[in-house]
């Protein structure tokens, strides 16, 4: 548990929409506070404002030196794998090798697929094909590939990423997602899952792969507030609005809420489940976003480090 790395990212949007400078300062401050990685999420069509993750991560890269730059998640079926390979290779190149590509297949919002001009059926198979292609395209050699989804003739992506092969972390909760993470990716990214379900998922990863060691990066939404009951109520209202369904049970099982000290203790349950990384995604009003990071998430990190030294 002491080796679990802490990262930070935005929630699935914020309760409003912060100014661009606040978003960039969030990434900059995350590095100053010592977090391991900064995460941005992705949709092509979303009912709330959302900045393109590659644009945001590129801007944060220019203002930081060390923090990892990650997507959680990038909806892989919506784009050409060659375009994705080039975009993330370029970001890795200009940032000095700091990219983590967290991917998902989407499907919860039909408008994403309408915006991409494709249908959601077979999105898992499409993503699997794209993941195989990404690893090949990042090797720097021309790629020929023909399947039901993509036709590539002598396609090259140069320069290569600094990391040579950018780590791909597959998100999702289904059996197909776990199989994808175990066989095609470099790790698994559970989100909106309880520690108990994550532990079960890790056991399943090991069954599928025959390996004991997997990178597991749990994304955990949090709602900070001195009054725990009020924090719970606000978290339910916010996530229910974002996901357009009742999220009360999800908040009770998966969303630490209340004072920073309480949140830190609840996050330890995720560490005990066997994850390697935890990404704290504070839910906050735009004018409270930086305070939530510096005072609340920063306090969680300090308490985490103190616990690791005991």
Image (cartoon, helix red, strand yellow):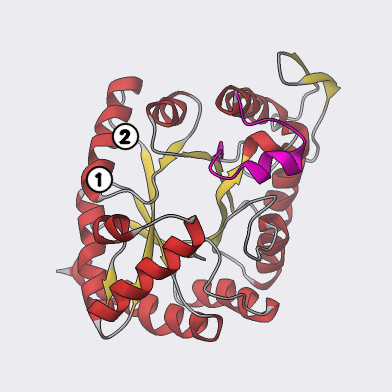
Identify whether 247 is placed above or below 262: above
Q: Is residue 199 visible?
A: yes
275 left or right of 76 in image: left
Q: Which residues are magenta?
A: 104-121
N-term-proximal mark, 1 vs 2: 2
Q: Is residue 58 left or right of residue 166?
A: right
Q: Secondary structure at mark 2?
A: loop
According to the image, label 2 marks what residue? Answer: 213
Residue 249 located within the stretch drawn in magenta:
no
Q: Which residue is mark 1?
A: 274
* Residue at 63% over, 25% down: 126
Q: Is residue 246 above or below residue 225?
A: above
Q: In the picture, residue 103 is in which quadrant?
A: top right
Instruction: Specify few, some or many for label 2: CA neighbours under 10 Å numbering under 14, 14-19, or 20 or more.
Output: few
Quarter occupied by residue 305: bottom left
Does 139 sit left or right of 98 as displayed? Answer: right
Residue 171, compared with residue 309, is above or below; it is above
> How crowded is the residue under tag 1: few (<14 C-alpha within 10 Å), some, or many (20+)?
many
């Amino acid at each position: 548990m002491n080796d679990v790395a802490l990262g930070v990212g935005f929630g699935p949007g914020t309760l409003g929409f912060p100014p661009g400078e606040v978003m960039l300062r969030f990434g900059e401050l995350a590095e100053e506070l010592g977090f391991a990685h900064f995460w941005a999420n992705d949709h092509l069509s979303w009912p709330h404002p959302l900045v393109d993750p590659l644009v945001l991560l590129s801007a944060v890269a220019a203002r930081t030196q060390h923090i990892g730059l990650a997507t959680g998640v990038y909806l892989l079926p919506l784009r050409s794998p060659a375009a994705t390979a080039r975009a993330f290779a370029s970001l890795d190149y200009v940032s000095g090798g700091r990219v983590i590509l967290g991917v998902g297949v989407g499907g919860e919002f039909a408008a994403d697929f309408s915006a991409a001009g494709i249908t959601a059926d077979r999105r898992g198979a499409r993503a699997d094909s794209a993941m195989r292609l990404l690893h090949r395209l990042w090797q720097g050699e021309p790629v020929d590939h023909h399947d039901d989804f993509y036709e590539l003739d002598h396609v090259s992506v140069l320069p290569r990423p600094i990391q040579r092969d950018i780590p791909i972390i597959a998100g999702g909760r289904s059996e197909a997602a776990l199989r994808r993470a175990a066989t095609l990716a470099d790790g698994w990214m559970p989100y909106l899952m309880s520690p108990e379900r994550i532990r079960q998922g890790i056991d399943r990863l090991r069954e599928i792969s025959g390996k004991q060691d997997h990178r597991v990066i749990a994304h955990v939404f949090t709602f900070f507030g001195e009054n725990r009951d009020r924090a719970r109520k606000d978290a339910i209202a916010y996530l229910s609005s974002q996901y357009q369904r009742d999220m009360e049970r999800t908040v009770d099982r998966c969303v630490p809420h209340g004072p920073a000290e309480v949140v830190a203790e609840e996050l330890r349950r995720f560490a005990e489940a066997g994850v390697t990384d935890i990404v704290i995604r504070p839910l906050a009003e735009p004018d409270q976003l930086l305070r939530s990071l510096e005072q609340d998430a920063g306090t969680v990190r300090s308490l985490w480090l103190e616990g690791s030294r005991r």
